[in-house]
Image: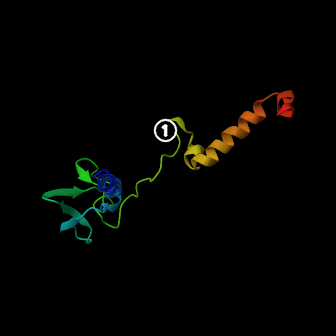
Amino acid sequence: MKRTLAPAIALGLSLMIAAPAWADDGVKSEVVERDAKGHATKVKVGETIYAVCTPESQDGCINPREAGLNFGSTPLDHWPGAPASGLTAAEKMRTAEQNEAARAKLEAAAQPPEQQSAE
């Protein structure tokens, strides 16, 4: 009994772990209304109809990319490294890696010469 139970448990656990990878991340939406330019203004996701966000309307709406549409802002796929409120204008234009390298360079330049030569 133990010999058949262990493989069954292992199979069950592997399917449970792998199941999220099988999930379809794409949102299934249907365009139900378009504006004069042909852009979707309302989409149906499941049984709910949502307004599509525009530069003029950003509350109570769905991001076009999240609705599966091919326009609108592309959400970041990573954390940029620091909150934007703590960055200067120049830092906001660089990647997190570039900001970290610049910060390290400034810290190295601020050290007294005897500490720099010891390192």
Q: Nearer the viewer, residue 78 or 10?
A: 10
Image: 66 above or below 40: above
Q: Nearer the viewer, residue 52 or 98?
A: 98
Q: Amino acid at mark 1?
A: Pro
Q: Which residue is mark 1?
A: 83
Residue at x 35% of width, y 65% of height: 71
Image quadrant assignment for residue 50: bottom left
Q: Residue furthest front?
A: 1
Image: 98 above or below 85: below
Residue 7: horizontal and vertical position, in percent? 34, 56
Residue at x 22% of width, y 62% of height: 41
Residue 96: horizontal and vertical position, in percent? 58, 46
Residue 105: horizontal and vertical position, in percent? 73, 40
Crowd band around label 1 with a 10 angstrom C-alpha radius: few (<14), some (14–19), many (20+): few
Image: 23 above or below 2: below
Q: Residue furthest left?
A: 47
